[in-house]
Amino acid sequence: MNKSLNCVEWKHGSLDQSNQLVAGGNGGALYLLTRNVMTVADPNQGDFDHELATPQAHSDHIRDLKICPSLFTEDVLLASAGDDKKIAIWIWKSEGLELHQTIEVGRAITRLAWNLTGKYLFAASADGPLSFVLDKEAQTLSLVNN
């Protein structure tokens, strides 16, 4: 893969998912990468096949992405954010990423962090922090403070 990337995140879960990750790059693209270990004798070796997951996910550089360590949902939720002043929430399904929610936050986001239970998302920016609470039923974020 010969792309400019800013962040990567492994998909956790079953063994077959341990060979998948998502990467965020310049220009707002997200890439899904799958490690091909089935044809390699040594499971610690192998190349990553990649595909462009969301060419229009963000309109500017993606600076961070984090998988929600949710203890109350079976879906894998992913948050992405960057220079376009948006946070996107994705549901990572076996067939790929599905955009679930986009939040305009009015400032470029440099880092994201979920709390241990996945109920709260913290976003950092040069203009100050933001925190959100996740509604476990609707799987949507709401701003707590800005």
Image (cartoon, rainbow, N blue to C red):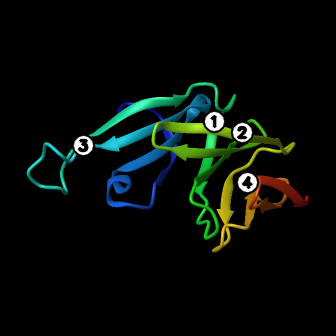
* Direction bottom: furthest residue: 116
Q: Amino acid at mark 2?
A: Asp
Answer few, some or many: residues within 10 Å of disc 3's Cα (few below 14, many 20 plus, some between 14 and 19).
some
* Direction right: furthest residue: 145
Q: Which residue is mark 4?
A: 139
First in residue order: circle 2 vs circle 3: 3
Q: Which residue is mark 2?
A: 83
Q: Amino acid at mark 3?
A: Asn
Measure how far apart labels 3 and 4 are at the Cα level: 31 Å
* Of marks 3 and 4, the one in the foreground: 4
First in residue order: circle 2 vs circle 4: 2
Q: Quadrant of the C terminus?
A: bottom right
Residue 14: which numbered mark, if any? none
Answer few, some or many: residues within 10 Å of disc 1's Cα (few below 14, many 20 plus, some between 14 and 19).
some
Q: Amino acid at mark 1?
A: His
Residue 17 % position (x, y): 38, 53
Q: Quadrant of the N terminus?
A: top left
Q: Amino acid at mark 4?
A: Gln
Callout 4: SS: loop
The vertical placement of 68 against 103, above or below, is: below
Measure how far apart labels 1 and 2 are at the Cα level: 5 Å
Callout 3: SS: loop
* Direction left: furthest residue: 41
Q: Which residue is mark 3?
A: 36
Verify CB contact (< 8 Å) between mark 1 and mark 2: yes
First in residue order: circle 4 vs circle 1: 1
The vertical placement of 129 against 50, above or below, is: below
Q: Which residue is mark 1?
A: 61
Displayed quadrant of residue 27: top right
